[in-house]
Image (tube, rainbow, N blue to C red):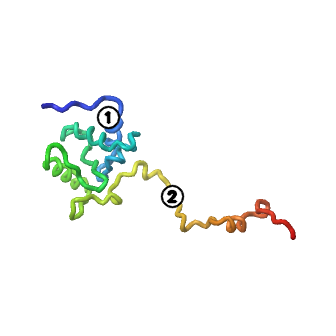
Amino acid sequence: MPRKAPAADGSHARVLRVVRRIPAGRVATYGQIATLAELPRQPRLVGYVLAALDGDSPVPWHRVINAAGAISARREGPGGAVLQRLRLEREGVGFDARGRVDLERYRWVPNARRAAPAPSTRDSAAPTSPRDRARSASPSTAPRRRAP
């Protein structure tokens, strides 16, 4: 029985647009795709959209995994999971002994090249307490004290 094609517009199209952006050698989670497609808290919908695709679809469905870094079961049975793992390994994505992907290493971060690193709060020279802020303030902005 042929699968029903996803809707050409709406939430299905948004999910597929985001999934198409995942580069080879990177993975994203169902929840991450839902958030990027402006469908927060709807990772199951992402799973339903991807499950409706044929295994030979040009959409890189194999780059979407669960939040634990594991491959979720597909309705094709274990053969679908094997195919997904083989495709990811061919792209350079590694798996640990438990069959999980290190998300810190392989997770896709959209626009990562353009994003500036966030400043570290520990290394910051900015004063943190009200007293420190008052001490570091210039004389014109420092709080005035009453004379005794």
Name the kind of residue labelled 1 in the image: His
Considering the image in quadrants, where does the C terminus appear?
A: bottom right
Q: Residue furthest front?
A: 148
Q: Which residue is mark 1?
A: 12
Which of 106/92 is in front? 106
- Residue 99 found in image quarter: bottom left
Whole-angstrom CA distance, mark 2 to mark 1, is 33 Å
Q: Which residue is mark 2?
A: 118
- Residue 107 found in image quarter: bottom left
Residue 48, above or below 102 = above
Residue 120 image offset from top left, x and y in percent:
52, 63
Q: For the residues carrying marks 2 and 1, which lies nearer the camera in this image?
A: 1
Q: Residue furthest top?
A: 8
At numbered mark 2, what does the secondary structure look like: helix, strand or loop? loop
Residue 16 image offset from top left, x and y in percent:
31, 38
**Residue at x 36%, y 48% (from the top left corner):** 32
Residue 49 image offset from top left, x and y in percent:
27, 38
